[in-house]
Amino acid sequence: MANKADAKRSSKCHALTLSNIGYTPNFKWTVWLGWQMSHITKNITVSFFSIDADQDFFRGFVSSFLASSATSNGSRIFNLRAKKHLIKAHKPIKLASGSAFLITVIRERHTWQIRATRDGNLSGISSNQGIIGDPYFFMVVPEDKLVLGFTSGPNGSIRSVAKTMLEQFKSDRRSTLDLSFVPKTKDYSALQSLPASGEMYLKIDTSSLTDAFDEAPKIIKDIGSSPFFEQNVQLIFKWQFEDSPQSKITKDGVIEVVNFFANQDGCLTLRIKSTDASGQPIRLDFGDAFFNYKTKISTRQTFIEEAASQRILKDALRLFQDSTGLDIK
């Protein structure tokens, strides 16, 4: 009898154990798997530009910005070079040195986009009188003649879109405005006094640059037209440059290449060799020549939300403060 009772208790215990194993969920695994399926991770690179304009522009910028942000939605749409742009002015934020102005730009990328589903069905995308395009997020700091920004679209277009954005706030249309990447090495300043001849070495990862050539100078568009850019390969270019009518690449062409590629994620190596007036060798490395801020964002959305973009720009500005001693809260 005792053996039967023990066996019965053992059977019950065994059944209870199997029940626990079969129905107790692994909550950590479930949460992790759900997070992986619902979040998208995006790489972000914030670029920094110095604004070359007269003082009247900065005074006019503040007045024009405040007038735009005071409207009901702070945004408007305009056409430029056959592309629609939406520009949206947000409320200014306070800094120790003054104010910073946050601006969102949506640039129409393609007017004939199409939606394709797995079963092979094709359909159009209705914009409902809006814009389907790439978002650009900017912060302007007039007191420091600085603009920083990033995009989830082609990174090579960030400077041209930033210039277009700033020009919308000009009070004097005859005044000139230009943007330059903010250098963090002495090599970039040495580029301006580069001798008239030398050699340039460029190594690029084409997979990171396929869509970045819309706003590029002609010499760079010629590079982008290479059939190799349709493949995910690494290319090496080695050019002799010289300021002469016979040379395909001049000193100005070299400066254009440096300005375009030095801040691109796909630029792996960019070096220049030359000699000075006394025959001494000059070696310049532009592989990491400009200030930038790189981070990642995880989001459930298929786009970067404006609140998240503003946090990224504020963090980038703090990094710039730490690197340059700029007094920013």
Image: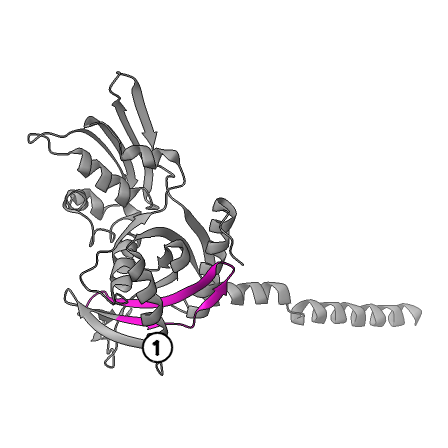
Mark 1 neighbour density, 10 Å: few (under 14) some (14–19) many (20 or more): some
Q: Amino acid at mark 1?
A: Gly
Q: Residue at x 40, y 66 (%)?
A: 102
Question: Which residue is farthest top?
Answer: 279
Where is 157 relative to 259, above or below? below
Q: What residue does disc 1 label? A: 74
The magenta stretch is 86-110
Q: Residue at x 52, y 65 (%)?
A: 35
Magenta stretch containing residue 122, yes or no?
no
| Left or right: residue 42 compared with residue 276 | right
| Left or right: residue 51 compared with residue 230 | right
Magenta stretch containing residue 108, yes or no?
yes
Secondary structure at numbered mark 1: loop
Image x and y of residue 258, in percent: 27, 39
| Quarter of image, res 99 | bottom left
Q: Residue at x 47, y 50 (%)?
A: 320
